[in-house]
Amino acid sequence: QGKVYQFKLVLLGESAVGKSSLVMRFVKDHFDEYRESTIGAAFLARSVQLEDDVTVKFEIWDTAGQERYKSLAPMYYRNANCAVVVYDITQPSSLEKAKAWVNELQRQADPNIVIALAGNKSDLEARRAVPTQTAKEYAEESGLLFFETSAKTDTNVTKLFDEIAKLMPRD
Ligand code: GDP
Ligand code: MG
């Protein structure tokens, strides 16, 4: 039934921005208020049917954001085809951290890597501290896909992965 394309995707970002929650929403359509923090990295997979005859399978590496695991990150992004760099719209410092990850990816990862910036926790609009426009302009300047997402309310999560899937090379 058509072609299956397999890609490696890595999630990066500060601790507690919702990386694991985005993966759980995407892979299992499930959300936990009290998610245990990731140790090292976790692996999950999900396929996306793009067209009748095209399936994209994501192998997802969900990394731990803590500083003590930072040295492991290159192992996960080195041969990644795509990356989702996550920040929390209520924490401006998490956007700064996301920018540092984007810089590192643009310097050290595969030059063809597709990078998406995800401003997560968009359901917490009342506590928003990062304007959409600020992040959007940064993403445009830096050549990133950009979405504001909520793993909690399932907003833009499918869209995020779908848009990445559409940009993946097919041969
Ligand atoms: P990680 O450390 O980046 O993997 O973050 P987690 O996925 O462990 O999430 C950290 C905390 O934020 C948990 O308490 C989650 O329930 C919560 N969280 C994650 N995504 C969202 C979201 O979209 N909205 C809200 N309100 N909380 C979220
Ligand atoms: Mg996690």
Image: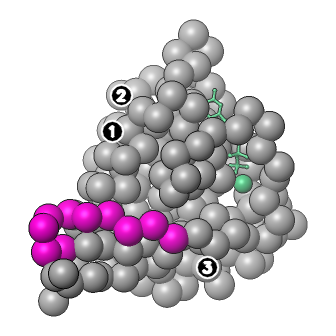
The residue that mark 1 highlights is 137
Beta carbon of the mark 2 residue lies under 8 A of ligand 1: no
Few, some or many C-alpha atoms within 10 Å of disc 1 (few <14, some 14-19, many ≥20)? few
Decide: marks 3, 1 in contact (CB < 8 A)?
A: no
Q: Main secondary structure of the magenta part?
A: strand
User: Looking at the image, in which quadrant does ligand 1 appear?
Assistant: top right
Residue type, mark 1 in image: Glu
Residue type, mark 2 in image: Gln
Location of the C terminus by quadrant is bottom left
Q: Where 109 falls versus 155 (above or below)?
A: below
Q: Residue at x 33, y 38 (%)?
A: 137
Q: Residue at x 25, y 64 (%)?
A: 49
Determine the residue located farthest toward the right in the rendered image: 68
Decide: marks 2, 1 in contact (CB < 8 A)?
A: yes
Residue type, mark 3 in image: Tyr
The residue that mark 2 highlights is 133
Which x, y percent locates residue 36?
A: 83, 49
Which x, y percent locates residue 125?
A: 52, 16
> Is residue 32 visible in this depiction of the protein?
yes
**Gap in angstroms between the C-alphas marked 3 and 1:** 27 Å
What colour scheme governs how the chains and residues are painted in the rendered image of this protein?
A: one colour
